[in-house]
Amino acid sequence: MTIHKMKKPLSCNPLKISQPLGGILAMQGIFRSMPILHGAQGCTSFAKTLLTRHFREPIAVQTTALQEMDVIFDADLNLEKALETVLTKHRPDVIGVLSTALTEASGTDYGAKVKKFKREHNLKNHLIVTSSLPDFRGSLESGYSAMVESIIDGLLEQSNRKTYKLLKNQINLLPGSFLTAGDVMEIKEMIGAFGFDVITLPDLSTSLAGHLMTGFSPMTRGGIPIDSARQMMRSGYTIAIGASMERPARRLHNAAGIPYRVFSGVSGLASSDEFFYFLQNLSRETVPLRYRWQRESLLDCMLDAQFNYAGISAVVALEPDHLLSVASWLEEMGVELRGLVASYETTLLEELNRDVWVGDLDDAEQLAQGADLWISNSHGKRGAKRCGAAFMAMGFPIVDELGAYTSVTVGYRGTMEQINKAGNLLIQREENAHEGSVCHR
């Protein structure tokens, strides 16, 4: 396997999304939380705009609104004022202070400032955490994972790292950033079907799943309550979905002795089988009948769609964890992967037996010449059109489709929906090609 790094003086049609946005996304899955972006106001506005357009929901986020003179003289003063304002006006249960490239490059010791603020205000009933998320490293996936890790560290600190008797019937679920709100709900139901109580951190399925709530709140209106999150230290097992979530799972293991298992994804026949086989062994229960029926339906779907996928090639441009998850079911359908483009380099990519390009959507367009299927976020739509490939929107952001955040892409049912969706796009592409070749008189 080879990782190809595109060397260009600039990024054309970027695939990479900043780490702070990933941190903000993770905070949306915690009830009554408020992320504070320690940086310029424009950084916060851009992140909030993308998240709002994707989820079509209000996004809770505040900023320290730094300007040039603030950074030069005392950026910590803005942070202190922001914390005081948020606590006075909103009284959130959880506050996450996220750094940006501006504060990281200036060398601001915001972590020490937050610790001092907590001591001076005696905030025992509030969870205030910090996370270093400079834009010049990583991407949305790494920012999301780092924020979850910081939250777990904060919970461990509040519990004084006590050891508890673990509850065998209670499972921690750490879903990766590439999972939709519908995916998180589906995985929770899968685990719960084997008799487990599930604690999910963060839980986007109850915050950004499109529910209606009366009134307005500047804080997150769904997600896991902080009291429930504190119960994670008593769980008998942790399940992490996505290689990027291994570090948060390892934190719980090292501090509380909770064993964990990391699944690279739960899309595709083999990955779904692996997930259900694990749950069956862990619970000593048989797989519920509805999931056995779903597996039969998936096999029939793969058989029905094989002729539409024969000889098909594809290019996929996504975050690393999502890239691997999508590539797995495409390969099961016999699709030739002409190009796999990731937003940044991770250890996961180094372990794959596939060639991967670390670059942007312009690189994906070069690889997609002659390809039949293009899978990426909405920013790749025009590139796919220029290449003549069928475009399938996945990842973040998806701004020109309804319900992307509630779609299910995991398990037998989710895999079947993906196969059918991509197959229908390929059928439509073929029909459009035939229409263009027919001469009407």
Image: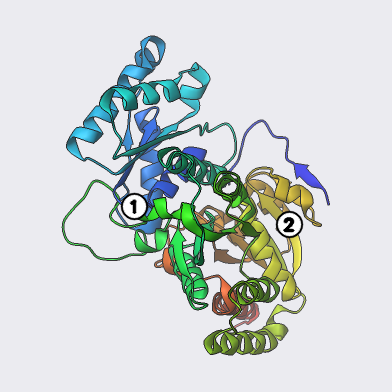
The earlier-in-sequence mark between 1 and 2 is: 1
Q: Is residue 71 above or below residue 309?
A: above
The residue nearer to you, when weighing 239 against 420, is 239
Res. 236 in view: yes
Name of the residue lying farthest toward the left: 215
In percent of width and height, residue 28 lies at 37, 50
Res. 397 in view: no
Q: Which residue is disc 1 drawn over?
A: 227
The residue nearer to you, when weighing 294 against 360, is 294
Q: Is residue 222 above or below residue 135?
A: below
Kind of residue indicated by mark 1 = Asp
Q: Which residue is disc 2 drawn over?
A: 339
Colouring: rainbow
Q: Secondary structure at mark 1?
A: helix
The answer to whether the residues at label 1 and label 2 have Cβ atoms under 8 Å apart is: no
Residue at the spot x=83%, y=52% of the render?
A: 1
Name of the residue lying farthest toward the top: 73
Kind of residue indicated by mark 2 = Gly
Instruction: Work out which quarter of the rendered image holds the C terminus and state it.
Output: bottom right
Q: How many marks?
A: 2
